[in-house]
Image (cartoon, rainbow, N blue to C red):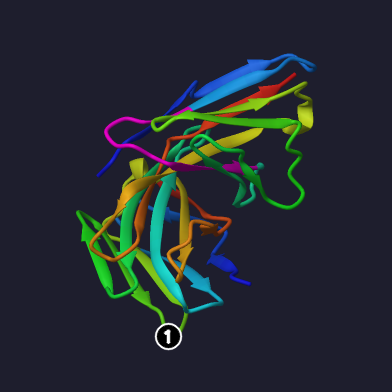
Amino acid sequence: GAVVSQHPSWVICKSGTSVKIECRSLDFQATTMFWYRQFPKQSLMLMATSNEGSKATYEQGVEKDKFLINHASLTLSTLTVTSAHPEDSSFYICSARVGAKGLAGSYEQYFGPGTRLTVT
Amino acid sequence: KQEVTQIPAALSVPEGENLVLNCSFTDSAIYNLQWFRQDPGKGLTSLLLIQSSQREQTSGRLNASLDKSSGRSTLYIAASQPGDSATYLCAVRPGTGGFKTIFGAGTRLFVKA
């Protein structure tokens, strides 16, 4: 299957700083990528949908000014956590939608391995 | 609204035992269901993906079944090993083929040597 990578796999930053997380589709073009967040011992929750060349769509309750998403190319989406605080410490995962419909008649999606953010 | 529940939340078994992890979902109109493994502090690893038209998928010692009508899936692990210790997540993709995948909270498995 298609491969999605994330960088970094883990990061520690100080409170008040900004952190950028990259999501790349390695062997396919992804017009749409998705960002999820997982708090400790909780489910993964969709944060936003990232569309190449346009603004991201955020889920209810997610601050768009805090979580900046840039989908500058068909293989790269970035999530920047601005002015990070300890409560932003979480596990962030992206997924990417394959550009062409599969045999099942819809677009397939593949998940990245995730990035663990710790804000001190 | 789709909800995904995983039972049990945690499980501890001796090495060699066969075990079953359960996943239930409230809306049977799904596109597919996927089982993931998550090691502590690490990322997701996709284990098995079952399309809505399928009833089961197998990979090595793993077997996942899907019963859409009853809103249930099970992940069967044969001859468990300490290396199987991890959190197992069940994820459901909506039937419209959309991408708001709903994840369960996971089952934390510990296999004792």
Instruction: Give x and y (percent) for residue B48.
Output: 31, 56
Is A74 placed left or right of A38 in the picture?
left
Question: Is residue B18 visible to the viewer in this orientation of the structure?
Answer: no
Q: Which residue is rendered at x = 60% and y = 21% of the image?
A: A20
**Residue furthest to the bottom:** B69
Instruction: Give x and y (percent) for residue B70.
Output: 45, 84
Q: Which residue is rendered at x = 33% and y = 37% of the image?
A: A29
Q: Main secondary structure of the magenta part?
A: strand
Instruction: Give x and y (percent) for residue A116.
Output: 57, 29
What kind of element bears circle 1? loop
Instruction: Check if residue A29 falls in the magenta segment.
Output: yes
Instruction: Check if residue A12 falls in the magenta segment.
Output: no
Q: Residue at label 1? A: B69
The image shows residue B83, relative to residue B94, as above or below, that is above
Name the image quarter holding the C terminus of chain A. Answer: top right
Q: Compare residues A69 and B76 and report the one nearer the observer.
A: A69
Q: Which residue is rendered at x = 73% and y = 37% of the image?
A: A64
Is A21 placed left or right of A80 in the picture?
left
Q: Compare residues B33 and B20 and report the one nearer the observer.
A: B33
Q: Which residues are magenta?
A: A23-38
Choose top left, top right, bottom left or bottom right for residue A36: top right
Three-letter amino acid code at the position of disc 1: Ser
Instruction: Say few, some or many: other residues with alpha carbon within 10 Å of mark 1 (under 14 / 14 to 19 / 20 or more).
Output: few
Q: Which residue is rendered at x = 80% and y = 16% of the image?
A: A16
